[in-house]
Image: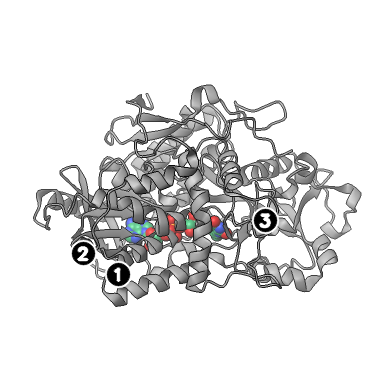
Amino acid sequence: MYYVDGEPIADTKSPDGPIETRWDRRRFGAKLVNPANRRKLTVIVVGTGLAGGSAAATLGEAGYRVKSYCYQDSPRRAHSIAAQGGINAAKNYRNDGDSIHRLFYDTVKGGDFRSRESNVYRLAQVSVEIIDQCVAQGVPFAREYGGLLDNRSFGGAQVSRTFYARGQTGQQLLLGAYQALERQVAAGTVETYTRHEMLELIVVDGRARGIVVRDLVTGEIRTDFADAVVLATGGYGNVFFLSTNAKGCNVTASWRAHRKGALFANPCYTQIHPTCIPQSGEHQSKLTLMSESLRNDGRVWVPLEAGDPRAPGDIPEAERDYYLERIYPSFGNLVPRDIASRATKNVCDEGRGVGPGGLGVYLDFADAIGRLGRDAVEAKYGNLFEMYERITGEDPYEVPMRIYPAVHYTMGGLWVDYDLQATIPGLFVIGEANFSDHGANRLGASALMQGLADGYFVLPNTINDYLAAGPFPQVDAGHPDAVEARTAVEDRLTRLLAVDGDRTVDSFHRELGRIMWDYCGMERTEEGLRKAIDLIRALRDEYWQRVRVPGSAATLNQALEKAGRVADFFELAELMCVDALHRTESCGGHFRAESQTEDGEARRDDEHFTYVAAWEWAGASAPPVLHKEDLTFEYVQPSQRSYK
Ligand SMILES: Cc1cc2nc3c(=O)[nH]c(=O)nc-3n(C[C@H](O)[C@H](O)[C@H](O)COP(=O)(O)OP(=O)(O)OC[C@H]3O[C@@H](n4cnc5c(N)ncnc54)[C@H](O)[C@@H]3O)c2cc1C
């Protein structure tokens, strides 16, 4: 038995009534905290990416006492810095028919009708405020000749609504959030703790009240307490070992909260991004994204004939297959990521892929360079072209880029209600760490939008409703629940060091990633998922008998850090496969081979699967419990998604 059924759950915080006014009404209905009382309330924010950085700065500005944690050496090294292409907002600067309703519609459809309408509508509403906020901070968005902010298109949309700062949008947005955070540090409302890793959540009387952290430099274990805890700890794509995520990205904070009672929603929804630099060999530990913005001007193609040995420049137009333009004429190269990735996999499976192992397709800028000129292409994408050349040694101005899908983003995460509160009262989850507004597939440029919507605008309003009942009774390091959490952390570190085996953490992680990619990656089958669960369990047992973690816990020890993260990945990986196995439909990033249309498109099963799957931890030796949150669609009617 892989799982058991539990009680259904509901999002009780989302108001009903007209969708346009729900957010206003929730804000009006939520309790407020008097400004003079805010300094008596403390909030821990774990994570300093776009979600956590913006939340900590905004809560500090509001007058709360904030403690901000991250494991990097500076808040501004959070993984958000890597985001390249842009951030969506329904500003309609291009006057091309965009509106809040259209962004809402595109996002619900893009997510394959597996997200909550209320949340997505709010996201689209708030998107316009984010741009104003960031411009006011001085974020240098690209501008048109006339001075207005420029826009470009991303997948799954027929309008231009993506704001960008060359190919380094995340970095510029993060510098904006970081400045706002540092202003609060100087003002004394925010304290930052860098190089600290949260290893456990402290729950007292059913409420999240603190965390256990390890100082990664000295090895010291500490407890810290607050009236509420916010997790903004990012996504878990690195469960696949190879992904476009920064090497440090992990699931530990979320997973520890899950083990303490927070439900984990839709873990199997993984985004495979279609345009990454193909893997070059077995030694590789990281994959590199080529931004989706490149599909505005780059054309994706493969040779018509399988096994064509000619160089791309020698293949005439008539012998090329621009397969996205052919299959999806209305969206062309800008179909959503799940669709583009699967189409790419299909042409490679037919033997028409290019480059080593046939695992690649061309992304060709020859037309764009001919039409716009090299300077214009360089102005838009210069740094991405440079990055590609540095990694592959090929000049994309001269020869087409080679790209292949890779793991990029996780739509699953801790379950939250409309207020972004998890099932543990006092625990709020924002950014990529929550199960988010993206349903089964995220549209490009929507993660930055969601992270900043959560951090600057949503959480700072909804958390008041919870904190209004505080301050809660004082808790200190001697409280039995704090002692228990701290002891659990120490015991686990000791256990990892005590194995003293003969295999590196990385060798296990790489093998786990391979299992996940083969059986829970771009295409999943019942047989494959069952096999994966067996393989993961066996490898996890082996891990606890053979892993070798050198050094001690009392010093800087990166092997030990990794070992804890990989131990959590093992447990998560099994849940991902169970989730994928139980969802016998295809939807968005979850493609079940048994559920496809005659022309190979994903076949959803709305009758049986229009719900969020929220999983409860029932202990290491008991199957997880499935709670379903039914999704209802009043404003966008679920239909067979077509981009043709
Ligand atoms: C290469 C790349 C390009 C992308 N480009 C785009 C784009 O153009 N547009 C777009 O919308 N999206 C893009 N994305 C997605 C987007 O960047 C991320 O989804 C988003 O930045 C996540 O932000 P976050 O604040 O939720 O988490 P992160 O930025 O990942 O931050 C996580 C934070 O949590 C901290 N943390 C984690 N665990 C712990 C712990 N246990 N203890 C203490 N601290 C912890 C980390 O130190 C860090 O500060 C891209 C992603 C990648 C990989």
- Name the residue carrying label 1: 192
Please identify the quadrant where the C terminus is shown. top right
Measure how far apart labels 3 and 1 are at the Cα level: 38 Å
Q: Residue at x 43, y 64 (%)?
A: 78
Near-viewer residue (141 or 490): 141
Q: Disc number at residue 36?
A: 2
Judged from the image, the secondary structure of the residue bearing numbered disc 3 is loop
Q: Give residue 54's quadrant in the image.
A: bottom left
Side of 311 where 236 appears, left or right? left
Q: In which quarter of the image is the N terminus?
A: top left
Q: Do the residues labelled 2 and 1 touch (CB within 8 Å)?
A: no
Three-letter code, disc 3: Ser
Element marked by disc 1: strand
In depth, the one of 206 and 283 nearer the eye is: 206
542 displayed left or right of 17: left
- Ligand 1 within 8 Å of disc 2? The answer is no
Gap between marks 2 and 1 measured at Cα: 23 Å
Give the labeled residue for mark 3.
160
State the residue at coordinates (48%, 33%).
580
Q: Is residue 210 above or below residue 54?
A: above
